[in-house]
Image (tube, rainbow, N blue to C red):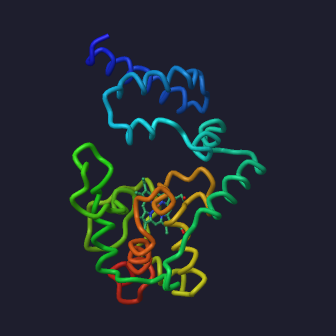
């Protein structure tokens, strides 16, 4: 099969899968999707190829269409919680200006980003509203405008926000939010900058 027709097969299988997932029924055999993905990306780097293999969390979330039974959810949550690492000095709030920069940046892990020339971003605005000044944002995640104010800037809320960003499944198993710390997208120091964006009194999020 040539390259274009294999892309078409991949697209067809994914559309079929999306339709059936929309009805919350999995009628396409997972092996078929795996094979189509692997075939369509055969020429990728080993780093990309490795990402075709689901880790245990993804495998379980796929198996249960993101609605795992209680016991499975508890397992996912526990392993997510165990993955969380904190900055060496224990400080969970960094610099909100750096946080705003990484919230705006979708740099990293794309074809054109190898070898990396810039720090990876968190792409928060792709899914969340954060500050009033930025009007271009996605709505897959809830609006985080005023997040710190709503949470009263408490130490517990700061810690919970750090953990949420580090590994979203520690709070909501099978979340659609990427596991930014656990997957090495952001460092603990970058995550505390993102926490500062949400949880500092002087951040534009809380104006
Ligand atoms: C691909 C989309 C996506 C990206 C990128 C993303 N998030 Fe999320 N986020 C979500 C979704 C969906 C939820 C709601 C479900 C959940 O709580 O897991 C969420 C929930 C949250 C929550 C919890 C909100 C609450 O109800 O208390 C916080 C805090 C958060 N995101 C912060 C961030 C930050 C900061 C970034 C960037 C570093 C980010 N998110 C990047 C999709 C995303």
Give left or right: position of 114 versus 95: left
Residue at 61% in and 47% down = 57
Q: Residue furthest top?
A: 1
Q: Is residue 68 above or below residue 43?
A: below
The x, y position of residue 174, in whole percent, is 59, 50
Give left or right: position of 35 versus 42: right
The x, y position of residue 10, in whole percent, is 39, 22
Residue at 54% in and 31% down = 21
Q: Which corner quadrant holds the N terminus? A: top left
Residue at 60% in and 27% down = 26
Q: Is residue 11 above or below residue 115?
A: above
The x, y position of residue 53, in whole percent, is 51, 36
Q: Residue furthest right?
A: 71
Question: Residue 163 appears in which quarter of the rendering?
Answer: bottom right
Residue at 45% in and 39% down = 50
Nearest the eye: 146 or 160: 160
Give left or right: position of 190 versus 155: left
């Amino acid at each position: 099969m040539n390259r274009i027709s294999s892309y078409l097969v991949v697209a067809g299988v994914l559309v079929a899968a999306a339709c059936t997932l929309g009805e919350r029924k999995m009628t396409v055999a997972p092996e078929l999707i795996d094979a189509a993905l692997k075939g369509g990306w055969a020429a990728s780097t080993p780093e990309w190829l490795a990402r075709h293999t689901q880790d245990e969390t993804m495998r379980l979330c796929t198996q249960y269409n993101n609605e795992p039974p209680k016991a499975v959810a508890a397992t996912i949550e526990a392993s997510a919680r165990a993955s969380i690492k904190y900055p060496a000095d224990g400080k969970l709030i960094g610099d909100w200006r750096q946080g705003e920069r990484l919230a705006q940046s979708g740099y990293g892990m794309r074809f054109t980003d190898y070898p990396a020339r810039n720090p990876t971003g968190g792409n928060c605005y792709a899914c969340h509203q954060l500050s009033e000044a930025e009007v271009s944002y996605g709505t897959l995640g809830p609006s985080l405008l005023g997040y710190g104010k709503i949470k009263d800037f408490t130490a517990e809320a700061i810690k919970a926000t750090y953990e949420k960003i580090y590994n979203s499944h520690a709070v909501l198993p099978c979340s659609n939010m990427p596991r930014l710390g656990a997957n090495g997208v952001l460092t603990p120091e970058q995550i505390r900058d993102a926490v500062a964006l949400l949880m500092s009194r002087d951040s534009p999020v809380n104006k």
